[in-house]
Amino acid sequence: MKAADGLVHRDVPSPNWNMRKAAISMVVLHYTGMRTGDEALERMCDPAAEVSAHYMIEEDGTVLRLVDEDKRAWHAGKALWRGIRDVNSASIGIELVNPGHDWGYRPFPEAQIDALLPLLADIVKRHDIPRANVVGHSDIAPARKDDPGELFPWERLADVRLALDLPPVSLGDPFANDGAFLLALARFGYDIADGRAAMAAFQRRWRPARIDGCYDGECAAILFALLLERDQGRAR
């Protein structure tokens, strides 16, 4: 199955792909992290770079398809999410043109998000992808990646049920210590090999106003609420 033609403006085939080894069950969102979209596109089409994505969305909302969805694009690298280690095989990767933290990180333009939403909705529907599996690169590789970063408008996705929203949170610390928090974070889906990085990734997604990688009661309450939603069947 392919995205509806009206959602893709141009095909720019990348040679950087191989065959999947798992069914599609995730979408991973990235920023390109390069000075321009042209630079990013050139790199993702360079065989020597060994990197690609299925789609790239320009800041003006132009959607490019680089790799067909039935192929394994090379966007995730070493990663883990909810027990899945070959994330490239199980996911569709979408790159959003943005210079990222190294080149002048900035908010994602309205036109770019307006193009992402219908594309993502189409992908999620066709592959029956759970909202909990629409994630950022930093969620699946917390020790290596920061994208799409704290300025990404996850609430826009949550408003139309394309990503998890923040459930009601009761203040208070439900975990005995930071070790218990990390175990709960692993249960939610994160790689906790680097605990501080995992905490920072969680904060970047769920408490972007303060990202310090330090355990605190507010983050603990948010995580507890998210797990409760999932365990009670209100989110998957």
Image (cartoon, rainbow, N blue to C red):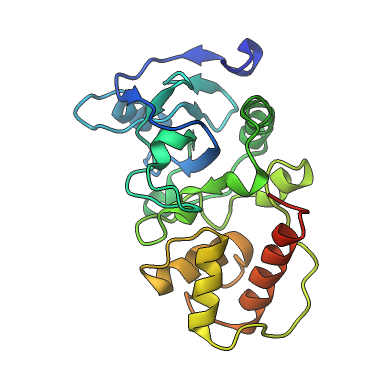
Relative vertical location of residue 62 with respect to residue 147 in this rendering, above or below: above
At a point 56% along the width and 23% down the height, the residue shown is: 62
Q: Is 131 left or right of 146, judged from the image as shown?
A: right
Query: Which residue sits at x=58%, y=83%?
Result: 216
Residue 75: horizontal and vertical position, in percent?
38, 37
Q: Is residue 196 above or below residue 73?
A: below
Left or right: 40 as drawn, with respect to 164: left
From the top left corner, tell me how far across and down residue 52 is, in percent.
36, 30
Residue located 61% across and 34% down the image: 112
Relative vertical location of residue 130 with respect to residue 180 in this rendering, above or below: above
Of 209 and 123, the residue lying toward us:
123
Q: Position of residue 33 (x, y in %)?
A: 40, 44
Q: For this rendering, which residue is in front, 231 or 225?
A: 231
Residue at 43% in and 61% down: 191
Q: Residue furthest bottom?
A: 176
Q: Is residue 90 left or right of residue 170?
A: left
Instruction: Pick the quarter of the image with the N terminus.
Output: top right
Tally of marks:
0
Q: Is residue 57 visible?
A: yes
Based on the displayed image, in which of its 4 quarters is residue 157 positioned?
top right
Q: Quadrant of residue 117?
A: top right
Does the rendering let one see residue 211?
no
Residue in the foreground of this view, choosing between 129 and 42: 129
In the rendered image, residue 114, in percent from the top left (x then y), is placed at: 69, 32
Is residue 201 toward the left or the right of residue 36 in the image? right
